[in-house]
Amino acid sequence: MENLKKTALYDIHCAVGAKMVPFAGYDMPVQYAGVSHEHHVVRSKVGMFDVSHMGQFWVEGSEAMAFINAVTSNDVSKLTEGKVQYSCLPNLTGGIVDDLLVYCVSPIQYMLVVNASNIAKDWAWLSQFAPNYEVTIRDASDDTSLIAVQGPLAAKAIQSLTNLDLAAMTYYTFGTGSFAGAEGILVSATGYTGSGGFEIYLPNAHAAAAWEAIMKAGAEFGLEPIGLGARDTLRLEMGFCLYGNDIDDATSPIEAGLSWITKFTKDFTNSAALKAQKEQGVTRKLVGIKLLERGVPRHGYPILNEQGEPVGEVTSGTMAPSLNEAIGMAYVPSDLAAPGSRVWVEVRGKALSAEVVTLPFYKA
């Protein structure tokens, strides 16, 4: 435990009684007032998350776009200044090194936002290819705090703290301006909840003051601090992939339903093999499932076919607070992947019936 990293907001979390747990090498708040309560706060009002464990790499130079386009699956050439793109880093064996966000600050400056548990792996991966391009890459992860303000009232809750017009910012765009007394702060209309909102990138020195300012400004809108537990139930209701659960080094973006961020109009790492896989079809697919009997699917639980044979496994699962239904994501054989297909989930030795459903589970 003593080796866990702490975010710049650690003392604030402890002071308000957050339950802290180890996560991706950090001591992070999993909940404050309870996961279900916090989930509903974000869906109906506005909540604030400390997600400073996420990693940030800056890529700069005359060939920045060419470099990122060569190592990511989506087409970075389509990005313009102030736009954000979801993408992944394919590996050489058909799997995914990580999924990430690409921010286009200018044609020669980008920010990559990567998963906390993969910072060292991603850095090593990108460092292999960077020498082939006129670029410099810089790891700003340890110097950057990230606060997510999410929910339908997010723009109203924090508009008084910034000179950016938050209501005018469309999904997957960003701006740079003042925030809570600090200048040059990047604020993006992104998030991992499906309820709208913003993510604010701050130097560590400004994080605590910004957190307190957001709490104060958001009080009249019912803003509360939200932990990683609700972040997980919120993203799962949307069918958003979690690296290490739903995607990893052995899952391809085609299997994972990420063909929409895999663009074969350009060459990128392992693109020929992935293109062939898309054309030939895959043997398994990541799908959403809804349990039809009482129980909760959990990560690693076997998926069974009608004959009771194991044919896949649950990658993420929960009792969805917005739906009051047991939901999950799972890899199943392609012939069982169509919505309406019947599968069974083995829960504590018992086979419970489930139905394949269209994602997202939650529709606002």
Image (spheres, grey):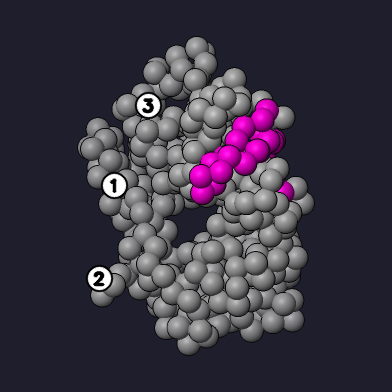
Mark positioned earlier in the residue sequence (2 or 1): 2
Give residue 232's position: percent from left, percent from top: 55, 57
Which residue of the protein is positioned furthest toward the front in this rendering?
A: 349
Give residue 47's position: percent from left, percent from top: 64, 70
Q: Amino acid at mark 3?
A: Gly
- Residue sitting nearer the eye, 12 or 140: 12
Say left or right for 220 vs 179: right
Q: Is residue 180 visible?
A: no
Residue 281 in the image: above or below residue 352: above
Residue holding disc 3 = 94
Residue at position x 36%, y 47% from top?
Answer: 59
Mark 3 neighbour density, 10 Å: few (under 14) some (14–19) many (20 or more) = some
What is the span of residues highlighted in magenta in the rendered image? 341-362
Residue at position x 60%, y 73% from top?
Answer: 34
- Residue sitting nearer the eye, 345 or 275: 345
Residue at position x 56%, y 77% from top?
Answer: 32
Q: Please tell me whether the stretch drawn in magenta is mainly helix, strand or loop.
A: strand
Kindly state the secondary structure of the residue where label 1 is placed: helix
Residue at position x 75%, y 65% from top?
Answer: 44
Give residue 285's position: percent from left, percent from top: 54, 28
Residue 148 in the image: above or below residue 264: below
Res. 121 mark: 1
Q: Amino acid at mark 1?
A: Lys
Which mark's residue is nearer the viewer, 3 or 1? 3
Q: Amino acid at mark 2?
A: Asn
Q: Does the magenta-highlighted stretch encompass residue 350?
A: yes
Res. 3 mark: 2
Say left or right for 14 vs 48: left
Are the residues flagged by discs 3 and 2 in contact, CB closer than 8 Å? no
Give residue 4's position: percent from left, percent from top: 30, 70
Which mark's residue is nearer the viewer, 2 or 1? 2
